Amino acid sequence: MILKSTMCIALLTLSLQAENNVSKFVADGEILFKKCVSCHGQKAEKKALNKSKILVDMTQVEIEKALRGYKEGTYGGSMKGLMTNQVKNMTQKDIYKVVFYIESLKKRDYNISPLN
């Protein structure tokens, strides 16, 4: 299953790069992620309700697997009920958009300076 997810994400990335649509996917993902911000943080840096993994620390495959699993009802512990409701109307394409957006957060420079 992980190999299948990895291959899907890789093929999607190549396809989007060929069409030069990666930035559109990321922008769409940012819009979809807005409903996640209150629990996961603006930069996907928080543990939702102090229980979840930190999304920005997860791989693309882990995020895709989790979102798809929540949608199918096959993933999640104590957060399963809450998350299933959050993702139930997402298409597979929407899930990939959110994955690409979270991945883009890892590459952004937020000009965070070290403490003195």
Image (cartoon, grey):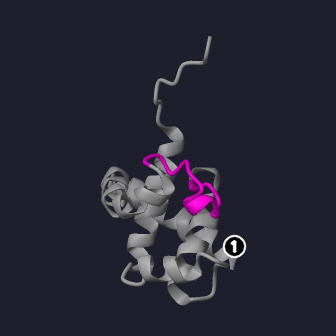
Label 1 crowd (10 A; few <14 / some 14-19 / many >=20): few
- Above or below, 89 against 10 in this view is below
* Percent coordinates x, y for residue 43 in the rendering: 47, 46
* Percent coordinates x, y for residue 73 in the rendering: 57, 89
Taking the view exactly as shown, the residue that stands out farthest to the bottom is: 73
Judging depth in this view, the residue of 91 and 84 nearest the camera is 84
Residue 14 in view in this figure:
no
Task: Locate the C terminus and report the quarter of the image it occupies.
Answer: top right
Taking the view exactly as shown, the residue that stands out farthest to the top is: 116
The question of residue 113 being in magenta is answered with no
State which quadrant residue 3 falls in.
bottom right
* Percent coordinates x, y for residue 46 in the rendering: 56, 51
The magenta-colored residue range is 42-55
- Above or below, 82 against 29 in this view is below
Q: Main secondary structure of the magenta part?
A: loop
Relative to 99, 53 lies left or right: right
Residue type at mark 1: give it.
Leu
Residue drawn at x 55%, y 48% is: 45
Q: Secondary structure at mark 1?
A: helix
* Percent coordinates x, y for residue 70 in the rendering: 55, 81
Relative to 51, 16 lies left or right: left
Numbered-mark total: 1
Judging depth in this view, the residue of 62 and 11 nearest the camera is 62
Q: Mark 1 highlights which residue?
A: 3
Residue drawn at x 41%, y 53% is: 17
